[in-house]
Amino acid sequence: MSGAPTREVARRAFAAEFNDASYTFKESDDERAPVYLLLPTGERANRVFVVGTLTEKEDVGEDSEYWRGRVVDPNGDTFFVYAGQYQPDAAAMLRELEAPEYVAIAGKPRTYEMDDGTVNVSLRPESITVVDDATRDRWVVETAERTLERISTFDDEANRYAAMAREEYDRPVESYRENAIRALESLDTGGGSSDRETEMSDGGTSEEADGESETPVQ
C-alpha cells in the first residue's frame, strides 16, 4: 500500500456557517497533521467545496500578484477567497474571470486574527471552475441536505465534533437550519440570472466588508 496521505473529504457549508467557524485544531501532535476547521453544526473540515457567484475580484498584492475574490451564496453571504503565487492556477482564474460568474471552488479554510481579537475565515483555493446554473443549484440542494444532516445528529452523545462545537461556539444551530431552508427556497424563485443579480446586490453589506479589512499573509 502507498504511504502517501489520502486527500481529505471536502465538506459543504453555506457561507454563514463557514464564516462563524473560528476554531481550528489537529487530531495529533505530528507537525504535519492536517489542520481542521470546526464547523458550528458539528463537523471537522480540512477541505471545503463551495459554489456561488463571483461578484468581485481584486489584486491586493504588493510585491506580487495576490488575488481576493468575493463569492456569494444564495443567502447573500460571502466566502472570501485568496490566491497568490502558491496557488498559481486559482490565481490565474481569478485574474481572467469577469464578474458576475458562477464558480465552483475546492480549497482549504484559513483563519486569521484581527487586531480586535475577532477571527475571520477565508478560503485558499486548490481549484476554481466556471459552472452553470444547474451545477450551482445542485450544490445548494446538497449543501442544505448535509447541513440538515449535521444538525439532526448534533445532540447525539457519540458525536464528538458536535460536543466540541457546543464547547467552542455560543451559537444556536437552529440559525443554520433556517439558513439552509432559506437557500432551498431561493431555488423556487426561478434561479438563473435573477439570482446572480440578487447575490450581486446582497454581497456588499457592511458586515461582509469587515471581513476584508485585513488581508491574510500568503
Image: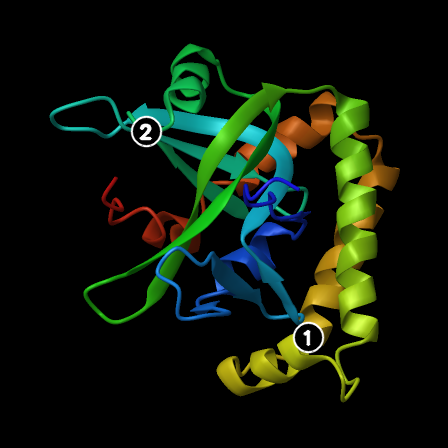
Type of amino acid at the residue the image marks with label 1: Val
Q: Depth check: give the residue in front, 127 or 16.
A: 127
- Residue ID at (37%, 58%): 120
Residue 211 position, x and y percent, is: 36, 52
Q: Depth check: give the residue in front, 197 or 158.
A: 158
Is residue 167 shown above or below 76?
below
**Left or right, residue 78 beside residue 196:** left
Q: Secondary structure at mark 2?
A: loop
How far apart marks 2 and 1 lie (CA) works out to: 35 Å
Residue 51 position, x and y percent, is: 65, 35
Which sits earlier in the primary sequence, circle 2 or circle 1?
Answer: 2
Query: How did the renderer colour the structure?
Result: rainbow
Residue 173, disc: 1
Type of amino acid at the residue the image marks with label 2: Tyr
Q: Quadrant of the C terminus?
A: top left
Say which quarter of the image contains residue 84. Answer: top left
- Residue ID at (67%, 70%): 41
**Left or right, residue 99 beside residue 160:** left
Q: Is residue 101 visible?
A: no
Residue bearing the label numbered 2? 86
Residue 115 position, x and y percent, is: 19, 65
